[in-house]
Amino acid sequence: MSAIKNEVRKIRFWTPLRLVTTVIAFGLLVAIGVSSCNSNDAPTKNARANTLPRQVLEAENRAASGAPIKLGDYSGKVLLVNLWATWCGPCRMETPELVRLHKEFQSRGVEMIGLSTENPDASARSVSDFVREFNVDYQIGWAKPEVAQIMMQGRTSIPQSFIIARDGRVIRRFIGFNPETTATQIKEALEQALKEEG
C-alpha cells in the first residue's frame, strides 16, 4: 500500500505545470549563460591608442603546443589577439570566421593568436577538442589572468578581439560577436593596420 502511495506522489510531483515551468526556467538559464559571454556593444575604435603595456607584451602565456606565447615577439607585425573560452556560445560562432580570416590574411603577414581565458590545467582537453573541431590553424593558448585583466579593462564579456598595429598600438577592439557585422569589421581593421607604416 505504501509503495502505491509513493508512486502516486511521484506522478503528482511532475504535473504539466511543473514540467513547463522547469523547461522555461532551464531555457532562461541557458539564455543568461549565452548572453553573459556576449556583448551588444559596438566595437570601439582606438580603445587604447597606445602600445600594449610591458607586462602584457612580456608575459609568457601558456601555449597549447610549443613555446610560450609572448605578444612582444610579434613586434613589427600586424596581430589579431582573440580572448575566448570553449564554453562561450558567441566564441564558438566567431571561430570559423577567424579561421577564414587567418587563411585570407596569413600570406600578407598578419599573425593571429587565440588566448583562452579558462584555467589551462582544467581546460586542456576541451581546448584541444575545440581546436580540432573548428580546424583552428592559428596559435592557441591561455591568457595569464593578469594579461586578460589588463587587456579587457574591466569588460569581462567575451569574445574580445584586438587588432594590433606593427608599432604595438591597439587600433581596434571588438567586444562580443555579431554574425552579420563583426567579421567584416575585423577584416576592415586588418586592412587598415596593413596600410599603416611600421
Image (cartoon, grey):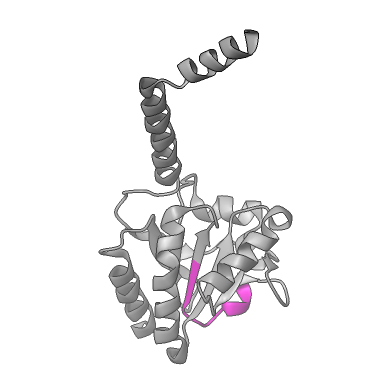
Q: Residue furthest left?
A: 180
Residue 175 vertical position relative to residue 61 in the rendered view, above or below: above
Image check: 72 left or right of 20?
right
Horizontal and vertical percent position of residue 35: 39, 44
* Res 198 seen here: no
Residue 99 vertical position relative to residue 43 in the rendered view, above or below: below
Looking at the rendered structure, the number of numbered marks drawn on it comes to: 0
Q: Quadrant of the N terminus?
A: top right
Horizontal and vertical percent position of residue 92: 45, 61
Residue at 60% of width from left, 70% of height from top?
140
Horizontal and vertical percent position of residue 10: 53, 18
Q: In the image shown, does 136 or 24 lie closer to the viewer?
A: 24
Give the extent of the magenta segment: 72-81
Residue at 37% of width from left, 23% of height from top?
16
Image check: 54 left or right of 83?
right
Residue 113 vertical position relative to residue 83 in the rendered view, above or below: below
